[in-house]
Structures are given as C-alpha cells and as structure tokens.
Image (spheres, grey):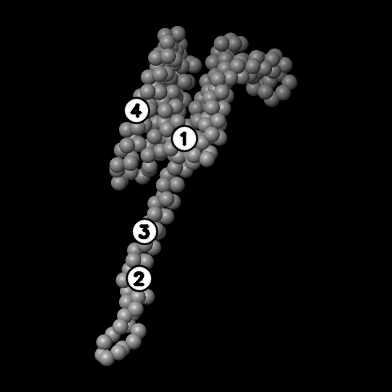
Amino acid sequence: MIIGVCGVASGMIGGWVSDRLAEKSASSTTMLWDESTGRLLIPIFGAFLAIPIWHMTMNASTFEGAMFWLAMKYLVAECWFGPAVAVLQSDVPSKYGGTAQGMFTLTGAMGNIAPSVMGILFCWTMDESARGDNIVGMIAENVAVAAGGNEQIMLATLLDGVVGWAYLLSGTCFVISALSSMAGQTTAGISHDDRESNEILVESKELIRIPVRVTDNKRSYMDD
C-alpha cells in the first residue's frame, strides 16, 4: 500500500512540480538555469532529502514509526522519474535517443535486482564475520559486537549505509546533469550573441559607401 499510494503520488506530484519549474524557467529572464535544470531540481532535492528519512526508517523504535518514515521516503524519493524522463527526451539528440533510453532502462533493471544483491551481501558479511580472518570479517565482527549479535540490527545497519550512499550517489549524478545543462545554456547563449554581433557588423558594413572617383564635381559611390 505504501509503495502503491505514496510511490505513485510522488511520481505524479514530482512531474507536475517539475513542469511548473520548467515553465517558470523558460518565461523568466532572471533565472540562472534553463528548463532542464529547473526540472532536475526536483530529483536533486528528493534524493538528498531521502537520506535522513531513510535513516529514520531504519532506526525507528516501533513498527508504526518505521512505516511512517518509509511512506515519507517514498513521497520524496520517487519524484525523480517524471523529470528524468522529460530531460532525457528533451536534451538527448535524436541520434542517441535509443542508446540513452537503453541505458536508462538498464539502471532500472539494476535497481530491481538490488534487493537480491543486498541479501547475498548480507549473507556473505555474516560468513566473513564468523571467520574474522580478513578486513571485511573484522569490520563485520565489530558491527556484530556493536549490534549485540542481533542480526536484525546488523541488517538495518547494512541497509542504512548502502541505501543512503546510493541516494547520495544518485543526487550527485542529478547535480552533475544540472550543471552540464547550465553550462550548455551558457555556451549556447554566447554563441547566439556572437552570431547577432556578426550579423550587425555585416549589416553596418553593407551600409558604408566610400567615394572612389570624382567626375564633373559629382561624387560616384561604390558599395564596399
């Protein structure tokens, strides 16, 4: 229910807000970013805000508290999909559209297998903790001691760290994309200004006439 309600609501609200930001960015002359950067503000804030909320989810003292924070996490973390697809379709050249869409689908598939990978990682960590003969085993053993040997606390600690770092990486990638879009806008603006300056120079030059000879006290002119 949390995934179905909060996840869908987050996607719809995130897409709507990103459209409003893109519209405002396009119509404003004081904004420092373009439409794509305006859209990407939503997934940036969503990814970074999800980190502390996920931490609260993993460290909640009651089941009801954990479910509340999990719902909040879905509300802020799932808002990225609409803006990301919109930017993908608007900014990527058509000749690279298939490749970009394929890579986007691949990242979704990687997210789908993440729970299985986490389960395998947890079992491997527990085995290494039992051995304690390498650095991974030593770290896992220290975590086990801190958790009092409670496997649930160890699993929560593992999920808290790995998922938190994943959100941090995701937010950083969105920031890089936004900065790239801003840099592209600045370059395009400079190129446009240069073209306008050259057009004005050519038009001014065409208007200049230079006297080349004098006949019967009348000047004849030739276009330069």
Residue 7: where, in percent of width, then height? 42, 18
Q: Are marks 1 and 4 in contact (CB under 8 Å)?
A: no
User: What kind of residue is marked 2?
Assistant: Lys
Give the mark, 1 or 3, whose residue is nearer the N terminus. Answer: 1
**CA separation, marks 3 and 2?**
14 Å
Give the mark, 1 or 4, whose residue is nearer the N terminus. Answer: 4
User: What kind of residue is marked 1?
Assistant: Leu
Residue of label 2? 205
The answer to whether any part of residue 99 appears in the image is yes
**CA separation, marks 3 and 4?**
36 Å
- In the structure shown, which secondary structural element does the residue marked by tag 2 occupy? helix
- In the structure shown, which secondary structural element does the residue marked by tag 1 occupy? helix
Label disc, if present, on residue 88 of the rendered structure: 1
Q: Are marks 3 and 2 in contact (CB under 8 Å)?
A: no
* Residue 198, image quadrant: bottom left
User: What kind of residue is marked 3?
Assistant: Glu
Q: Residues within 10 Å of mark 1 (few under 14, many from 20)?
A: some
Q: Residues within 10 Å of mark 4 (few under 14, many from 20)?
A: some
Residue 52: where, in percent of width, then height? 45, 24
Residue 222: where, in percent of width, then height? 34, 78
User: What kind of residue is marked 4?
Assistant: Trp
Residue 204, compared with residue 130, is above or below; it is below
Label 1 vs label 4, nearer the camera = 1
Residue at point 44%, 15% (across, down): 3
Give the mark, 2 or 1, whose residue is nearer the N terminus. Answer: 1
Q: Are marks 4 and 2 in contact (CB under 8 Å)?
A: no
- In the structure shown, which secondary structural element does the residue marked by tag 3 occupy? helix
**CA separation, marks 1 and 4?**
17 Å
Give the mark, 3 or 4, whose residue is nearer the N terminus. Answer: 4
Residue of label 3? 196
**CA separation, marks 4 and 2?**
50 Å
Label disc, if present, on residue 16 of the rendered structure: 4
